[in-house]
Image: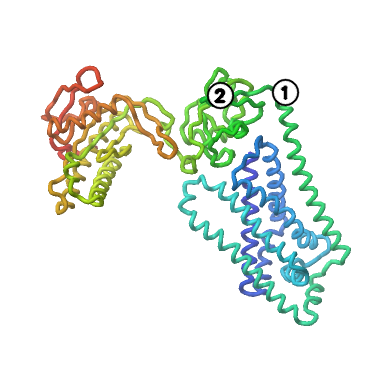
Amino acid sequence: MIGRLRLWSGYVLFLYVVTHLLNHALGLISLRVLEEGRHWFTFVWSNPAGQILLYGSLLAHFLLALWSLYRRRALKLSRWEWTQWILGGAIIPLGVIHVAGTRLAADLYGVQSGYPWVLGTLVAGSWTGILRQFSLPLVVWMHGCIGLHFALRLKPWYRDWLPLLYAVALLIPAASLAGAAVALRDVAELAQRPGFLEGLFERAHIPSPGQIDHLYSIAAGLEYTALALLAIAIAARPLRDLWERRAGVVRLDYGERRSVTQPTGLTILEMSRVAGIPHASVCGGRGRCSTCRVRISGDDRHRLPPASPEEAKVLARIGTPANVRLACQLRPPPGYYRVALLLPAAAGPVEAYRRQPQAHGGERYIAVLFADIRGFTTISEGKLPYDVVFLLNRYFRATGQAVEAAGGRLDKFIGDGVMAIFGLNQEPQVACRQALDAARRMALALADLNEAMSGDLDAPLRIGIGLHAGPAIVGEMGYARAAQITAIGDTVNTASRLESMTKEFAVDLVVSQELLDRAGIDLGEAPRHEVEIRGRQGRLSVRAVARAADLTAMS
């Protein structure tokens, strides 16, 4: 809830900044339009409801930022996080002067704190004031954009919209600064007229020197208060650590001779960071992604607290088993736990998107398809590398589309071969029927490809397909970005062997009777063979189909 409150207070403040900067941009038109735009801006934000929302969000965002600093066990932040914190700290000295000279001056002394007053004081003042006023919107904007990026980059639509959002992020501050610069130039030109600035300040009800000193003292007080709160948050961290050590310690065993012992109260992610163990966390430990997830085991696992509603929602989204938790949310009680990191430290936003439950590993009844081009080595001889790549890509596209159209998952391409899996999210009967349908579609797609490339091929391409169904271990396997959901086991090996047998039987398809029985399909007069599979005990009953394209469409 604290994280969500901080996020939504940031959204409110960012909306305020956007409208304020767009108002500045009206200076590109004229001073009159700039001031008229301010009336609409103040209508939205200066009414009682707008004031409560704005200043409430500002106070909440600041205090919750200090709370998050206090709660952090290690200040090992990414460069972008450090940049956001530094920019956020710079807003305070730049912003309090602006607030004191506008909002407080209007409330305490009746100053008409519109653009004429602000621009007039800049013209009459020094370059330091101009530099401070023009730096403030840039610092606020960059701080807000970094926060918005961290909040939204886990959304599936964010990557598609990123180019447009990036353009907007550049155009808004550029137009704002340009509008303010043009308006400042116009006021500076008008200030050359005798008595112009005096009349402007008179209409704005300029405060007296004593009142100006009072405003500066208020600004300094706000700065010192913010600095004191920051110091308290930092100083309280070691005191918190000493207090929490009284409750006992937690020992985490990461394997590979890596272990961590820390006091209770820390999350597993914080313990990893304190110990310098690389640990993925795309959202920065805010519980919005799932990249920090870990598998927990050990004698004390039963002592772990249940997942919070927010953590449970993320875990349900990716379909994790009961022993998988989010490292950024889990604060284990004293005890010994074995921890396995499930994603590499370099995992990015893509790994945080919705994933299939099978990714975590398990046994499932599936149908497996292997296909291979017959005599491709001979076909490729004498062809230019470009022609070989072009031909293979056309073949892969045709077969891949056939597999996906049948409802299967394209697992991998191996040379000129293809592996596909059916049944990750379907019942065994449906999976087996989909595999047969994919074989038929692949044969038809290859016939179309042969016709399209008849002028480039000395002989038409021929395909061999092996199909088998049975239990297999399914899970996400591999390393870093090469990891993917795949299957291993006897069923996969058998399907590969059946594909090789298409050469021996001189047919397009060899399918196990096990798959046909599960699918409820009778192939009629298709020859039946009892074959031995290397590495498998007993003989396997298979059917040899001369033309896979002649299979009846599966409904």
Question: Where's the N terminus, which quadrant?
Answer: top right
Q: Secondary structure at mark 2?
A: strand
Give the residue at x 14% y 24%.
529
| Horizontal side of residue 58 vs 288, given as left or right | right
Query: Dot 2 corresponds to which residue?
Result: 253
Three-letter amino acid code of the residue under disc 1: Arg
Question: Where's the C terminus, which quadrant?
Answer: top left
Image coords of residue 183 (percent x, y): 67, 72
Q: Which mark is residue 246?
A: 1
The vertical placement of 217 against 130, above or below, is: above
Q: Quadrant of residue 417?
A: top left
Q: Secondary structure at mark 1?
A: loop
Give the residue at x 69% y 72%.
184
Answer with mark 1 or mark 2, whichever residue precedes in sequence: 1
| Horizontal side of residue 172 vs 431, given as left or right | right
The vertical placement of 115 against 107, above or below, is: below
Figure label count: 2
Image coords of residue 418 (percent x, y): 27, 38
Image coords of residue 393 (percent x, y): 27, 48
Three-letter amino acid code of the residue under disc 2: Asp
Q: Which mark is residue 145?
A: none
Per the model, the C-alpha gap separating discs 1 and 2 is 22 Å
